[in-house]
Image: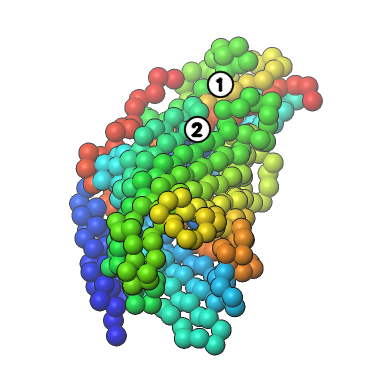
Amino acid sequence: MPHPLRVPRAFALTLVLFAASLTQAAAHCFVGARFFPATLAVDDPCVADEMSLPTVSWSKTGDVPPASEWDVSAEISKRITEDFGISIGDTWSQIRPPGGPTQAGFSDLETTLQYQLLKDGSQELALLLGLIVDWGGTGATNSGLGTSYSALTPTFYFGKGFGDLPDATGWLRAFAVTGQVGYQFPTSSYDVAMGAYIPQYLVYGGSIQYSMPYLKSEIKDLQLPDLINHLIPIVEAQLATPVANNFGNSYLTTGTINPGVIWVGSYFQVGLEAQLPVNRASGTGLGFLGQLHLYLDDMFPQTIGRPLLGGSTTAPRKLSF
Amino acid sequence: MRTLFGFLSLLVVAAAPGAAHAHAFLDHASPLVGSTVPTAPHEVSLSFTQNLEPAFSSVEVTDASGARVDQGKARISGNTMQIGLKALPPGSYKVRWHALSVDTHATEGNFSFHVGGP
């Protein structure tokens, strides 16, 4: 039986893409000479026209005995203006406990509004504000993959490249970090069906990344194979800590540490990461996470790769030298 | 989910970027980025991954004191940018470039090279 939300989701995406095709503008996460790739577990610090299709992960849950879980998600991000954008995404999950019935379905639809506070090219610094909304009642509530209530997460994002370090620091200048901190609060404080309080969470994470493209074009061209020059080795972390309305439950932090690598091309990137749970409650053993990510601004620069309104505020300028 | 992915996949294929371009990355440079050359080069040559818009792309070369040591006017054709140099004494030099690919994606960067010595 088709999922009741399947058609509206596809229709909504169609509307976004169609509307986007009627307007104009230009870029993903370039800040000066620094390019921040789209990270897999946390978000990069820029509004952009991009699409993650798909992101696939496999892991074993922290249950005893652990269940096997597959997650497949898609997300499209679209700039409304040069500095303001919206993302729409959803995840389909399948959880298979040993000897038990398999649960499968969509989680709640997630939308994110983002505003670019700052892009400082000379310092390779980007700051971003966002509001993530998980829309209650849009997922498979019967199987526990969706919830009957919504959750709001105001989030602050940052990215900082170290290219502004002195030249003497050499290859260290290819490092960059990104991070995000959000506070998630549900629209309901008590889940009647589960008979439990719904906690408020501090949701945070980040990445440390080493850009081989930056090393080659800004620091030293070691004439390495082309494949190597497109790689960005990365370690991501995504964590959540219940901080309020958690009566009778543990305040244990859960999350994963994800070492991996991203291959960056002109029109898309491919990322693959391992997922290491930070404790027993976060999962069992090694998982993995993979993603194909498309740069819509580069693929479709005259149509859906431009902001819906206003075009580019960073119009080309005639350079004096 | 399969319907959604099918739809999006179809969209991507249908709108395949036949005439698309992208950000212009520096592919290689002469002298090489970060290199030390024994004798002074007569020009700096930059090759990018995309064709450039000449009116909005540029390069300059400066010495350790920040003084210009290039000959002022870059030659830009296709995906390459070249600029002549004055006679360079041994020392460190900085190359700063701005590139606008033909579909108006802007990129920038800078790197050093060294003349003479180890």
Residue A293 in picture, x, y percent from top left: 45, 58
Please give the chain letter of the residue carrying mark 2.
A
Which structural element holds mark 1? Answer: strand
User: A121 or A219, which is in the foreground?
Assistant: A121
Residue A225, above or below A149: above
Q: Which residue is mark 2?
A: A124
Name the residue rendered at 57%, 27% in the picture: A164
Q: Nearer the viewer, residue A27 or B48?
A: A27
Q: Quadrant of the C terminus of chain A?
A: top left
Query: x, y (%) of residue A59?
Result: 56, 70
Placement of A33 over or under A188, stated as above or below: above
Which residue lies under the disc numbered 1?
B61
> Which residue is farthest right?
B118
Disc 1 residue type (three-letter): Val
The circle drawn on residue B30 is none
* Separation (CA) of disc 1 from disc 2: 21 Å
Name which residue type carries label 2: Glu
Chain under callout 1 = B
Which one is closest to the eye, mark 1 or mark 2?
2
Seen in the image, is A3 located left or right of residue A294?
left
Q: Residue at x 39, y 39 (%)?
A: A128
Number of residues whose C-alpha sits closer than 10 Å to that of mark 1, classed few (under 14), some (14–19) or many (20 or more): many
The residue nearer to you, when weighing A227 against A208, is: A208
Q: Is residue A84 left or right of residue B107?
A: left
